Image (tube, rainbow, N blue to C red):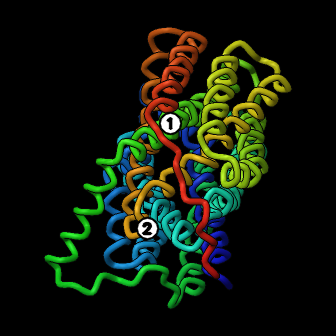
Amino acid sequence: MTPFNALCSVGFLARFSYALARNPVLPLFALYLGAGPEAIGLAVGISTVTGIFFKMPSGALSDVIGRRKTLLMGLVVFGVMPFTYLLVNDYTLLIVIRFLHGLATAIYGPVAMAVVADIAGARKGEWLSWFSSVTILGTLAGAPVGGFLLTYVTRGDGPALHDFRLVFLLSGLAGAAALLLGLVALRGKETVAPHPGALKERLGRFFSGIKEVVSDRRVVITSNMEGLQNLTVGALEAFLPVYAVKVAGLNEFQAGLLWGVQVLTTILSKPMMGRMSDRWGRKSIIVAGMVLCAGSFAAIPLLTSFILLLVTALVFGLGEAFVTSSSAALVADVCQEKHFGAAMGAFGTIFDIGHASGPILAGLLIARFDYFTSFVMMAVLLLIAIPVFVLGVDEGRDRTKTAKTV
């Protein structure tokens, strides 16, 4: 099995495990525990806050100690943390576990992307998109499966504590399978040799990589586009299930399908968009995606029909594919290869700031206003960012590099 195929296989299982414990199960579980809108937003967003603090150090660490060791650290969290949800019977403990569970994606995510950037050469957009699409398949499967179990295994008027625990148990088994596969498939495979120097030299490389990456305006602005787009993704993760069930009158399975359609559209579109950005440039694709996401996001609170909500979710998923297929590749284009880990960590940190802020901001706005006003206010932020990106990022790239053999 090639390193790329191994990463995709492990990523699929890990994301399936993570999605089972997240959407639509998590916001409905927080609602079951008595949480209001602000508290639901915090429960969904707190695991992403973890990434704000740990993604950049994890990526930079992989530049120093090697990718494989760092990847396996993340997989241990994927394999262990879901089982701790079985102990949850109050909201406070849920928040603590969600924060710790966020270490899984905070460590694994940027390092896996750095590995793909290491081996992709001039095909970064295409390969990063394929990798993302395959791992998102786990998310696609996890959301409807979680919603299905809560809808059709439930006894009585609604999900009880044991129904949620059944979903969390399945999440744990999938995470453990990802860890075991990673231990076998990634054995001996390393794209970046550990830095041979003493501890002082390693720390120097660690901090110099972070400094060089965060001082590059192009990296920061491009990452901000992904972060703002994920502001709306995070808000939908938290409140699309609640809106669908409580306002539109849909059931939990239909709420999961809305998210699944969005994710499926992103999966199918990303490789093609990544290939296009490799050939013709990244910026125009990113701008088009931001416009699609802003328009569809603002339209959701105007709809209660399941079919119309499905169509709107499809448009949002297409816009997400446009942005995410090109933003990570553009960041990799402008940074030095020796700092791919730090660059992907910086990108992931800003990504998570947006993702974590989305449900928290949406919860605060919905508690004060209504769904429509809140969603329109957030959509405007995406549109404001477009001219800053267009004027602030020069897309000059070397297209002569060829992909490395894997």
Mark 1 / mark 2, whichever is N-terminal: 1
> Residue 324, labelled with which disc?
none
Callout 2 secondary element:
helix
> Residue 225, labelled with which disc?
1
Residue, disc 2? 337
Question: Which residue is depicted at the point 51% across and 15% down?
Answer: 377
Callout 1 secondary element:
helix
Of badges 1 and 2, nearer the viewer stands 2
Question: Which residue is depicted at the point 63% across and 77% down?
Answer: 6
Quarter of the picture holding the C terminus: bottom right
Question: Which residue is depicted at the point 64% across and 18% down?
Answer: 298
Q: CA distance from mark 1 to mark 2?
A: 22 Å
Classify residue 211 as left or right of residue 292: left
Residue 69 placed where, x, y %? 41, 79
Q: Nearer the viewer, residue 367 or 199?
A: 199
Question: Which residue is depicted at the point 64% across and 49% down?
Answer: 325
